[in-house]
Amino acid sequence: MLTVSKYVFLDLLKNRSILVYTAVLAVLSFTLLGLDGNSAKGLLSLLNITLLFVPVITTLFSAIYFFNSLEFIELLLSQPVKRAGILLSEYAGMALSLSAAFVVGVGAPLMVLLPIGASFVLILTGVLLTFIFTSIGLLIFVISRDKTRGIGAAIIVSLFFTLLFDGLMMAFIFSFSDYPIEKAVVGMIGLNPVDLARILMLLQLDVAVLMGYSGALFKDFLGSSAGSIYSVACMLLWIVVPLLLALRIFRKKDL
Amino acid sequence: MIQIDNLTKSFGKFRALDGIDLHLEKGQAVSLLGPNGSGKTTLIKSILGLVIPEKGTITINGQLIRNNPAYRANIGYMPQIGRYPDNMTIEQVIHMIKDIRKEQTNYDEELYHSFGLDKIKQKKMRTLSGGTRQKVSACIAFLFSPDIYILDEPTAGLDPVANELLKDKIAAECARGKLVLITSHVLSDLDGLTSHIIYLQDGKLMFHESIGELQERTGEKKLNKIIANILTNADSKQICIS
């Protein structure tokens, strides 16, 4: 069923954008980790890079690639295969190659310079984010009627999660600060995969000062381990739900 | 082989296909003609299951095609625009299609060799010209010698040599009792190849007749003359009515 994903993966490994993405990540990782003797600081900077770069690049790149493959997907669908199989293959090929780029670009320098537990969590976080935003990119591709609109949507969605959501959250906390909104805030964090990733990472580093209001709440309410499980579970949902939605819509889509 | 009943499809307010009834038999080479936007591609895509019809049914070899992808094992499709992943080589693309249809192992690689693709099989798809990509699409369509060929503008962009090779291949497959459905705007390419003409306009079926009948009715021999004759007559009729 996933025969096509092997070929998509091989095609993407030779893709110039993916190679540049890997190289940029690698250069950033080496400089940030080498810059400071303090390992936690280096990890934190790398975390911020991951949280900004991965969602934006992944969503945009995957959406553009899917749109460019439209004619190819049509050709594949004229073969005796199910639509779901082809879409899942495209998804798997894309998510795996972007993850490979992240693991090589960030993971390898981390393993060389800073082989501690928290580094592994950062790699895991990056891979989870890659799968999530590929899933979202796929959903955008399936919903949008044309490429221009699709790419516009991809830009807006990725910026919404990386920048805008925090602002909205801040406004929410500010305007309801007189009420007991702690539980609501913890719930709201589940709505943003980027925040989930940040908290998952910060819970490992134990730098409560840097966690901000929502992070501190998280730790207070759930504790380190329950908090980690909650955020990983939410992130897995963020992979599965858009993917299932995309498959559902794609089944009835006119190509 | 292909039975279409009351096929209707709209995109928003636009009626792309409006109650099409068709019956196509094996051994026929059917040309699908009509102006731009008359629903030719939508009809082809409906048969391939790429467009989901809102009304009507399509039956292929007695099987309803809805939710049943297996019927496409009998179809070879050559799209109008062939675009492939940039970094795949010709060889990889062919391999992949073979991988997808694992059950079918009788390959017809005549075009692959006569087009000379075997000599450039290591080339990446990105570096190929439009015509060469068209050749790859043709190879894929004929690879499994299916019973039904659906060719969307097959000769567009091909050089004269390749054009003749492809036409010979189509004629040979027809002679073997296959059903070939072709759309093309180059009517002279279809001359001597087609046995039947389907003419669509504004999503409606104007006529579906054999070449012999049309030649008799219009007194013309060449395909482009026949079509021109019918269209001008139809126009003058319309003017008379209005």
Image (spheres, helix red, strand yellow):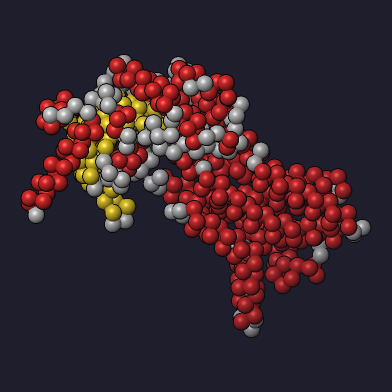
Locate the C terminus of chain A and report the quarter of the image it occupies.
Answer: top left
Q: Residue furthest bottom?
A: A178
| Camera-nearest residue between B154 and B232 | B232
> Where's residue B201, x and y in %?
23, 44
Question: What residue is shown at x 84% (from left), y 51% (from top)?
Answer: A30
Query: In the current view of this chain or complex, which residue is farthest to the left?
Result: B240
Q: Quadrant of residue B230?
A: top left
Residue sitting farthest toward the right: A37
Q: Position of residue A68 (x, y in %)?
A: 52, 45
Q: Nearer the viewer, residue A197 or A141?
A: A141
- Residue B59 visible in the displayed image: no
Q: How far from the left and from the top, in percent, is residue B26? A: 26, 22
Q: Tell me if residue A49 comes above or below residue A243 in the rendering.
A: below
Q: Residue at x 30, y 47 (%)?
A: B37
Left/right of residue B80 with respect to residue B28 in the rendered view: right
In the image, residue B109 above or below residue A150: above
Position of B98 compared to A193: left or right? Answer: left
Query: How far across and down, in percent of the image, does residue B19 sit?
Result: 20, 44
- Which sits in the foreground, B168 or A201? B168
